[in-house]
Image (tube, helix red, strand yellow):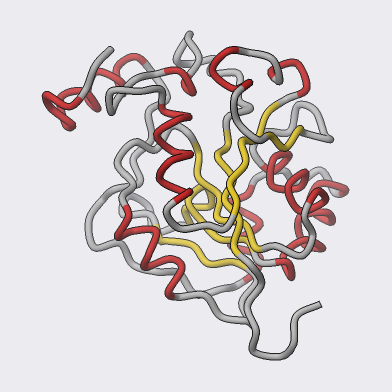
Amino acid sequence: MNHAGELAPLYGLVLAGGSSTRMRRDKAALELHGRPQLAWGYALLTRHCEQVFVSVRADQRTEAVRAGFPQVVDIHEGIGPIAGIAAAQVAHPHAAWLVLACDLPFVDDEMLARLIAGRRGDQPVMAYRSTSDGLPEPLCAIFEPASAPMVRESIAAGRNCPRKLVIASGVPLIEQTAPLLGNVNTPEDLAAAHRRLGSECHS
């Protein structure tokens, strides 16, 4: 347990356990920065966190794009990204988790640094506000150890939406200085991301 005012060590978690149904190909393997998105996200988090892990389903552990990374394996099936957050909190309950979905190719170091700088010992979650609808962006966010009971209770009640969990927590949100939290869910999103990132992109 941390002493009053002392922040928990910060670990990173790349969420890469999705089924990529709308993309029709593995989003973790998409190359938008000259390497797979999973590898890019892992490197990004490594610059800000003490340890970094990749969130996977049990059947993904040996896949080539995931096998070379430290992993946290889901302990709940079929409930989406909250499963990865829950598994990480069980595996390392003393840590705070900087969570990053593998389909957010525009997040940068400055954005993560602002998130980390905003950490407070009395706030269970630190998240940005969406520039599109004003709601929390839970898949580029920090989940402190104090959020673990909220995560467990949400799953037990069948409430598996991380966004609704952050809303229910009532925490204040950080305003984005630029719309960098657009995700890549479909082939059309991928084409738009290639255009936005320009010549850096490789498919």
Q: How many marks?
A: 0
* View extreme (top): residue: 24
User: Residue 7 is drawn in which quadrant?
Assistant: bottom right
Q: Is residue 202 left or right of residue 51?
A: left
Residue 71 lies, with reference to residue 10, above or below; the image says above
- Work out whether residue 9 or residue 126 is closer to the camera in this orientation and state it: 9
- Work out whether residue 41 or residue 23 is closer to the camera in this orientation and state it: 41
Quadrant showing the N terminus: bottom right
Q: Is residue 82 left or right of residue 195?
A: right
For the point 65% across and 84% down, which residue is it? 6
Residue 118 lies, with reference to residue 160, above or below; the image says below
Quadrant showing the C terminus: top left
For the point 66% across and 66% down, which residue is it? 144
Q: Position of residue 116 (x, y in %)?
A: 46, 68
- Work out whether residue 34 or residue 107 is closer to the camera in this orientation and state it: 34
- Work out whether residue 153 or residue 142 is closer to the camera in this orientation and state it: 142
For the point 48% across and 49% down, which residue is it? 46
Residue 161 lies, with reference to residue 123, above or below; the image says above
Q: Position of residue 34 (x, y in %)?
A: 28, 23
Q: Position of residue 182 (x, y in %)?
A: 34, 40
Q: Is residue 22 left or right of residue 59?
A: left
For the point 50% across and 15% down, which residue is it? 26
Q: Position of residue 85 (x, y in %)?
A: 69, 47
Residue 129 lies, with reference to residue 19, above or below; the image says below
